[in-house]
Image (cartoon, rainbow, N blue to C red):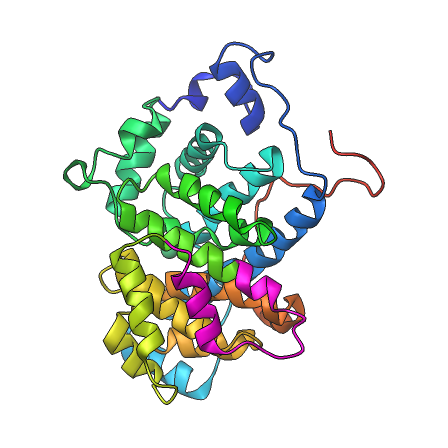
Amino acid sequence: MSLWKSIPNCDTLRPCLSLRTNSQILYPMPALPPDHEARVQRALVSLQGLSVGDSFGERFFGPPGRAQELIAKRLPPPPKWSYTDDTAMALSVVDTLVEHGRIDQDYLAIAFAKRFNDEPDRGYGGGARQILDSIGAGVSWRIAAAEPFGGEGSQGNGAAMRVAPLGAYFADDIDSLVDQALASAQVTHLHPDGQAGAVAVALAAAFAWQSRDSTTPPSAADLLRFVESRMPPSETRQGVRTALSLPSTTTVDQAASALGAGYRITSADTVPFSLWCASRSLSDYEAALWATVSALGDRDTTCAIVGGIVVLSAGLHSIPERWILSRESLSLRYRPRPQGLPNP
Ligand SMILES: [Mg+2]
């Protein structure tokens, strides 16, 4: 039986966590940064871009000919666009930041597992299902994350697909961003490359936010250099270096061929291509997503990553309203704090 199912009348995450330790007193109210509300608003912008991208990309699975026809004509798929595990996990990342102002790994692990328990059919991969099942049964994430993949941990793209809102939250503090992106990844991705992908996407999101009002729009290489110079050594970083080496005339198909487009569902096979796509369309959300989905591949995830980054520079208004209306509504626990009130 799942942990929270054994707790009567438990309908929110915070009471569950408190009850889990048998003491509300042992669960202190975290100190939030003075600009917490502004940071949360940035994270919510990224979450919109991520979730629309995720649900948009998901609708292009199915017969390849049909997907390619829609892409060639730039015809958005008919609603409703259901979101997948990318958004479900990003919602938990944002919930954690709202509550704690940082990544509390125990809180995040239970949030992931609770959403999985509530909605297991969001397209979670086999490794993720195993980890989240274990956490839901009461196993520490430190043990659960080590169980699959022969004890090496996951080097999949799952930590990268959910992390752009974290990059937005820490966009003004790059040192903390790197630490927090790693912390968010470790809950499910023990392998260093799975973690490196999360750091890379969070860095790209911060870069996009910082460049939103730039009088001189950054080049694609600017974003890739910013990321590559700050991310940990890894196969994924090698892929970002390859992306940097591609000539400006490179087509999407050529980039996908050189970098991968997520068919292997690894960080190294997904993140470099996604960053390459985002870097070339930082001011145009629609163009970024059409280019990204045209490579097919792991299209819900590549579009989630690109959407969560590009919206931070292009702005919320850059997402077509009909796309937002096509996506199913999001179930975030966050409620805006009334203006003028101090943080608790
Ligand atoms: Mg997915």
**How many dots with numbers?**
0
Q: What stretch of residues is rendered in magenta?
A: 206-231
Per the image, is 226 magenta?
yes
The N terminus - image quarter: top left
Judge whether 88 appears above or below 281 on screen. Answer: above
Residue 36, horizontal then vertical, whole percent: 68, 42
Quadrant in the picture for the C terminus: top right
Tell me the residue at 37%/36% (across/down). 187
Q: Is there any visible trace of residue 313 in the rendered image?
A: yes
Q: Quadrant of residue 197?
A: bottom left
Within the magenta stretch, is there residue 17?
Answer: no
Whether residue 242 sits left or right of residue 230 in the image: it is left
Q: Is residue 289 something that shows in the picture?
A: no
Q: Position of residue 132 (x, y in %)?
A: 34, 35
The part of the image, by quadrant, that contains residue 336 is top right
* Farthest-out residue, left: 150
**Which quarter is ligand 1 in?**
bottom left
Instruction: Indicate left or right for 226 with 25 as reference.
Output: left
The correct choice, above or below, for 161 with respect to 281 in the image is above
Instruction: Return the residue nearer the eye: 298 or 96.
Output: 96
Q: Position of residue 176 (x, y in %)?
A: 52, 44
Q: Tell me where residue 226 appears, x and y as whole percent.
A: 46, 64
Is residue 100 shown above or below 216? above
